[in-house]
């Protein structure tokens, strides 16, 4: 039977690079070994970084929220017979987001809605909690009144939202999560599966890109997400560990947390403080693209157009800066559209009573100036917009 698969991921470049497992405080991840350390210390930081970046596209370094080994997106493949069967169910779905309006959320929702339409599942609600747990609890309660068969969601807070998701599961709703799961939930019992980018791997990717831009030497600051949010903690840990293990001449001189919901504004304030305190700061890492926009604003206000900024997520504003060769030196991109497609396939399997993998993850996509336009098409399944194309130098 024909299997339905998501669009093929970027073909990896095969380079020999030793890889070893390493533990993190969040319960186990794997990262490239410190085989590049000697090269970085000896002036070959760019070559060491390029080798690591090629290798990372071949693997997923993250473990799942409960320590699960990652399964590939192909493990969620469905058949035409599956689609015919689920269409006969006349099922309904709701999409319950942590916050919306950013490029990542828009791409996830686009992938979800397009694929739900293909398999004949009606989307009856799409909500935006603006990163407020109480608003998300209310959203779930409101959505349940529409009697969906499936909810695809990302919890704003794994503890504060748990009871609302429990109520949904108790009502017979099949739950498929993005990135994170509520506290105390068990795969196969309380929810079908969770789909994620390789967030630890994205932190590793951005660390190598920062090191490449700095040629393995300099002083940097870190702006992290100050919340109990699994995926952003993974990014932070992946970045820090990669720098510490592989680039001994890069010094982290300050770290500041931001809690939002004004993530760009909070990051701008944090970056302003760092730049005022450390006149010799060479770079700043930001936990995703919206905080990175705040760092860019701080750099411009301080006349620091030489500052190196690395981040995660291919948002339009950071993509334009990368295309221009201004401030942003690289990022680790998620594949949100493909994640949305995979989530739909897992929902179909759950509705049909089929076994689903507990944790599915898609590998990191390193994005630099040279591949930003191609990366946009891979991430969003559409050509780069005109303003991005016109920005490329």
Image (tube, helix red, strand yellow):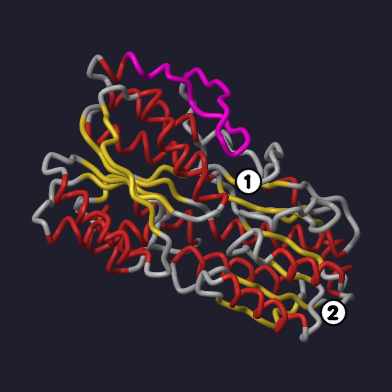
Q: Quadrant of residue 279?
A: top left
> Could you say where residue 193 lies in the image, as x and y percent from the top left?
75, 54
Q: Is residue 113 visible?
A: yes
Magenta stretch? 16-38
Q: Secondary structure at mark 1?
A: strand
**Residue extending furthest toward the left:** 303
Q: Which mark is residue 90?
A: 2
Query: Between marks 1 and 2, how big is the CA–CA gap?
Result: 29 Å
**Label 1 vs 2, first from the N-terminus:** 2
Residue at (43% x, 54% y) in the render:
313
Total numbered labels: 2
> Could you say where residue 364 lies in the image, as x and y percent from the top left?
50, 43
Task: Say left or right for 140 vs 33.
Answer: right
Residue at (57% x, 50% y) in the render:
230
Q: Nearer the viewer, residue 323 or 161?
A: 161
Q: What residue is shown with label 1?
A: 361
> Could you say where residue 209 lies in the image, as x and y percent from the top left?
33, 37
- Is residue 55 in the magenta section? no
Task: Say left or right for 302 vs 314.
Answer: left
Residue 104 to residue 251: above or below: below
């Amino acid at each position: 039977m024909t299997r339905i698969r998501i669009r093929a991921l970027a073909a990896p470049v095969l380079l020999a690079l030793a890889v070893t497992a390493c533990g993190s405080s969040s319960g186990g991840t794997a990262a490239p070994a410190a085989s590049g350390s000697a090269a970085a210390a000896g002036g070959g930081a760019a070559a060491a970084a390029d080798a690591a970046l090629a290798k990372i596209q071949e693997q997923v370094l993250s473990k799942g929220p409960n320590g699960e080994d990652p399964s590939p997106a192909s493990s969620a493949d469905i058949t035409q017979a599956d689609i015919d069967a689920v269409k006969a169910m006349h099922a309904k779905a709701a999409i319950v987001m942590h916050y919306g309006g950013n490029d990542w959320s828009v791409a996830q929702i686009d992938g979800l809605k397009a694929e739900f339409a293909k398999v004949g599942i009606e989307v009856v609600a799409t909500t935006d909690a603006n990163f407020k747990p109480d608003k998300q609890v209310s959203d779930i309660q409101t959505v349940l009144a529409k009697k969906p068969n499936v909810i695809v969601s990302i919890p704003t807070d794994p503890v504060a939202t748990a009871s609302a998701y429990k109520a949904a599961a108790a009502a017979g709703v099949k739950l498929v999560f993005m990135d994170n799961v509520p506290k105390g939930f068990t795969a196969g019992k309380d929810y079908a599966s969770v789909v994620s980018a390789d967030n630890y791997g994205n932190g590793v990717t951005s660390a190598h890109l920062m090191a490449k831009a700095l040629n393995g030497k300099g002083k940097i600051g870190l702006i992290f997400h100050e919340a109990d949010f699994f995926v952003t903690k993974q990014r932070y840990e992946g970045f820090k560990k990669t720098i510490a293990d592989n680039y001994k001449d890069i010094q982290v001189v300050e770290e500041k947390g931001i809690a939002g919901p004004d993530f760009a504004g909070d990051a701008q304030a944090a970056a302003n403080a760092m730049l005022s305190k450390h006149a010799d700061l060479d770079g700043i890492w930001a936990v995703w693209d919206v905080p990175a926009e705040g760092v860019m604003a701080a750099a411009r206000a301080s006349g620091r157009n030489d500052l190196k900024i690395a981040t995660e997520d291919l948002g339009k504003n950071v993509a334009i800066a990368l295309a221009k060769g201004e401030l942003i030196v690289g990022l680790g991109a998620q594949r949100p559209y493909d994640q949305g497609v995979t989530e739909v396939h897992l929902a179909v399997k759950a509705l049909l009573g089929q076994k689903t993998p507990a944790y599915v993850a898609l590998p990191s996509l390193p994005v630099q100036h040279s591949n930003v336009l191609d990366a946009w098409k891979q991430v969003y399944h559409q050509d780069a917009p005109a303003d991005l194309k016109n920005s490329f130098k």
